[in-house]
Image (tube, grey):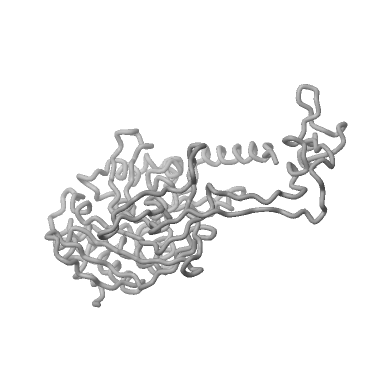
Amino acid sequence: MSELTFDGLRAAVGGGAVALRSLTTLQPAGGSGDKVFPPTYAVAQSAEHRYAVEERVVGDEVKTTVLLDSVASQANRAEMALLEGWESHALGFPVPFVDFTVDDELSDLGRLTVLEAPHRIADAIFRDSLLDSTLFRLSDVGRAITNASPLDATALFRYSPTALLFGVWDSTGPKGGLGSKFQRAYVSEIVGLDARIGKKVGSRIDPLQIGRGAAVAFEHADAERHWTLDESEAAREKGEPKTKGDGKPSEINHGNVTPFIDSLSGGVTITSAIQTTVISLAALRRLRFAGHDRSTETAARVAVAALGVAAIAYQHEMDYDLRSRCLLVPEHPPRIELVGRDGSAPEVVAIDRSSAAGILDAAAERAADSGIGWESDEIRLVPAPKLVELIKRSRQVSALEQPSE
């Protein structure tokens, strides 16, 4: 199998392929027959379980599948993979960020990048921060991004190209719901095949052997002391001592927990899992860059596609530890299929971190030579005073609120 090259990617983006596709077969790290735990969802009280299970046609068969990682979750993981490459200086591309370390009380937030913000460069965190002492939306960079659209994506490409890969809707900007929408070109998900819903059990043996009827536990008037058995020390509600829940020792985390069976979220067994990642070159070809010729527009699209290729390679080597008790292991190295328009068998090429980084460097250089390069200076914002004050007030309120136990 040959490796993907910059020339090969450029030919594909230029019209030689309609999509790049990566199919990765995965198995539970515990081996055949080991359970994995999918994400759980709110369901009706009568539901048999809390998983996203559906029938899908896989090859020539209809299989019962379970969603192990959604499109949105996979996009976030791909962004974290690119962030890891950017922070290690292995990948070079613009990553605007808000630096919260400028305030000692907020230094624990560190810096928040467009790869971490929920709405990427259009997030309210960026809107409410300052670039060179100016509110981001009122800065030259912010105005250019606000005015960007699929008919002229030049500014977004220059300052935040990952938004063109993963999609963004500028709904928090001055245009509100009429803000520009860029569809996601990178789509990925992981599903388990031949899913069989299981059960899990739980219990707790209290080494102190505190019985259910030992005493009534009250909520303490001093929140930091949590609970008390003395009514005179109890918090009051309408003049009466307030119990912790029903007052049983279990409400204060003492006592035994009777063994139980959980059928709603008891995990699943699968024969295998498939990660399907598609980078739509058709979507990238719809992006226009006003004032630039066809060759320059292609160079910009290739650079965005190269970011997607890097995301595939880097995510593969960050492993597939999706959540507690859902660690998957790939059966083969990453590979990419160049999917043509004519239905013929796709060309399959290999990719790894090193080659992906080389392709991205070449693509960025070609775009710059064509006159549509990425911003090379650091795009560092700081939170506006009003955002700092909002966070601090929120923290003060949270410190006063004691969650019930």
User: Residue 221: x percent and y percent?
Assistant: 80, 34
Question: On the rendered structure, is 23 left or right of 107?
Answer: left
Where in the figure is residue 141, as x and y percent of width and height?
A: 34, 47
The residue nearer to you, when weighing 152 against 341, is: 341
Task: Residue at the far top: name it.
Answer: 238
Query: Against 175, is 259 above or below?
Result: below
Residue 135 placement (x, y as % from top left): 42, 41
Residue found farthest to the bottom: 1
Residue at the spot 49% in from the left edge and 60% down from the top edge: 36
**The N terminus lies in quadrant:** bottom left
Between 97 and 347, the residue placed more toward the observer is: 347
Task: Tell me if residue 158 can be seen.
Answer: no
Task: Determine whether, in the image, residue 110 is placed left or right of residue 97.
Answer: right
Residue 309 visible here = yes
State the count of labels: 0
Quadrant where the image shows the C terminus = top right
Q: Quadrant of residue 305?
A: bottom left
Q: Residue at x 35, y 73 (%)?
A: 333
Is residue 320 shown above or below 199? below
Please tell me which residue is depicted at 40% across the width and 64% down the height of the picture: 272
Near-viewer residue (93 or 305): 305
- x, y percentage for residue 160? 34, 53
